């Protein structure tokens, strides 16, 4: 066991990273014969694709596997440090490899949504010319964060969170790597806590390894047994926060549930936003907008309640803010609905855009402008 936890030891997630599609857990809908991943691998031309989905589901792993199956060199660019010069240099490198017959270059950009528009524009020409194959990964909604020009040149492949069964298989593989045995009920609890994030599940396994080996009796056993009580002694493992790829989808689901007067559904999606770590002030703002836009004059009290909720949440924060948000959401779901206000103001704005140069009628002018108007007519 000497050196087991030395500083140069790779994290568990890196040590058991799958090296082939057959070793991947989950995403069967993408990995089957004729699926989008197989098409990426089989293409005889350079490819451009972005894997979009929550953290810890294998986006980076999949990019490595695609590059390996295409017999290509793998190169990574950092969205936070790479500039336009770096993109030009790697583009020249890719073209040089192709011309010399050394094969293709696959350029991987993690968190590609962090690229500025200038950086994204720099990717257009090499992607169009086939200087390299571009693979990106993002936890955001690519349709909201990537430029239309770049989107027109890439394939977006959506990847969902891993199932509890898939996480359980990964946990067992991680336990084997750590030389441990984990009871089934603990495996299921880890799968539940990790919310489809394999990286977080493996962090829990690593933490359990430390706790189990702190027991002088168990550390002598091979394999080392994990006990259910060990879960209670774990250090806090922070949440990865909201799945940014679902940020818009969850918000949309909340609003549509409110429109359908579905209080239970509204609370469900409100709770998912809260649990995921969404800013409660953002949620409160969305409720206030809904009160004005969708409830409107059918119940003017709704805007007062939503406005108070916004102010209170900003003052008290969480976790108490969840109660205020829930009360506002339940009220809005049960309120009558009318979109007359937004329809009327939108119509007025459209009309006003064509009437900006028209004078204000005399009988509607103030005292000073009315006098000015009479002088102008003389």
Image (spheres, helix red, strand yellow):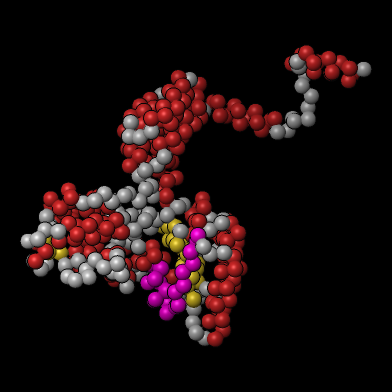
Q: Residue at x 50, y 56 (%)?
A: 114
User: Is 213 or 321 nearer to us in this picture?
Assistant: 213
Q: Is residue 93 left or right of residue 73?
A: right
Image coordinates of residue 305 in percent, x first then y, are 43, 23
Q: Residue at x 22, y 64 (%)?
A: 174
Looking at the image, which residue sits at the far left? 217
Looking at the picture, does residue 241 appear above or below residue 10? above
Image coordinates of residue 329 in percent, x first then y, are 38, 30
Looking at the picture, does residue 232 appear above or below residue 93? above
User: Is 138 or 130 nearer to us in this picture?
Assistant: 138
User: Is 23 or 4 nearer to us in this picture?
Assistant: 4
Q: Is residue 84 magenta?
A: no
Which corner quadrant of the image does residue 365 belong to? top right
Looking at the image, which residue sits at the far right? 378
Q: Residue at x 51, y 30 (%)?
A: 293
Which corner quadrant of the image does residue 319 belong to? top left
Q: Residue at x 57, y 61 (%)?
A: 119
Residue range (magenta): 62-80
Q: The C terminus appears in which quarter of the rendering?
A: top right
Image coordinates of residue 134 in percent, x first then y, are 50, 68
Q: Is residue 63 magenta?
A: yes
Q: The N terminus appears in which quarter of the rendering?
A: bottom left
Q: Is residue 242 left or right of residue 231?
A: right
Looking at the picture, does residue 207 appear above or below residue 327? below
Residue 247 in sight from this viewpoint: yes
User: Is 314 or 34 nearer to us in this picture?
Assistant: 314
């Amino acid at each position: 066991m000497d050196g087991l936890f030395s500083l140069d030891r790779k994290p568990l997630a890196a040590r058991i990273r799958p090296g082939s599609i057959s070793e991947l857990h989950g995403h069967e809908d993408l990995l089957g014969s004729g699926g989008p991943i197989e098409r990426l691998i089989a293409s005889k031309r350079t490819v451009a694709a972005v894997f979009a989905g929550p953290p810890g589901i294998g986006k980076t792993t999949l990019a490595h596997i695609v590059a390996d199956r295409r017999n290509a060199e793998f190169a990574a660019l950092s969205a936070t440090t790479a500039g336009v010069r770096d993109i030009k240099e790697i583009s020249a490198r890719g073209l040089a490899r192709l011309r010399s017959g050394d094969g293709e270059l696959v350029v991987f950009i993690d968190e590609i949504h962090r690229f500025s528009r200038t950086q994204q524009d720099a990717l257009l020409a090499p992607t169009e010319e086939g200087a390299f194959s571009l693979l990106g990964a993002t936890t955001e909604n690519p349709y909201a964060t990537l430029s239309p020009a770049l989107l027109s040149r890439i394939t977006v492949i959506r990847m969902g969170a891993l199932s509890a069964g898939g996480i359980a298989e990964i946990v067992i593989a991680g336990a084997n790597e750590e030389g441990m045995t984990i009871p089934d009920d603990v495996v299921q609890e880890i799968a539940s806590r990790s919310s489809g994030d394999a990286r977080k599940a493996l962090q829990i396994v690593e933490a359990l390894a430390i706790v189990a080996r702190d027991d002088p009796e168990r550390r002598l056993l091979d394999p080392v047994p994990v006990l259910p009580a060990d879960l209670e002694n774990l250090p806090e493992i922070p949440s990865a926060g909201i799945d940014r790829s679902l940020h818009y989808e969850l918000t949309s689901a909340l609003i549509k549930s409110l429109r359908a007067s579905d209080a239970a559904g509204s609370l469900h999606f409100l709770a998912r936003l809260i649990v995921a770590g969404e800013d409660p002030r953002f949620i409160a703002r969305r409720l206030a907008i809904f009160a004005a836009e969708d409830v409107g004059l059918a119940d003017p009290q709704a805007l007062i309640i939503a406005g108070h909720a916004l102010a209170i949440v900003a003052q008290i924060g969480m976790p108490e803010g969840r109660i205020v948000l829930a009360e506002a959401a339940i009220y809005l779901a049960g309120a009558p609905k009318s979109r007359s206000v937004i329809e009327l103001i939108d119509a007025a704005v459209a009309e006003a855009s064509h009437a900006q140069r028209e004078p204000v009628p005399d009988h509607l002018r103030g005292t000073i402008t009315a006098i000015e108007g009479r002088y102008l007519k003389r």
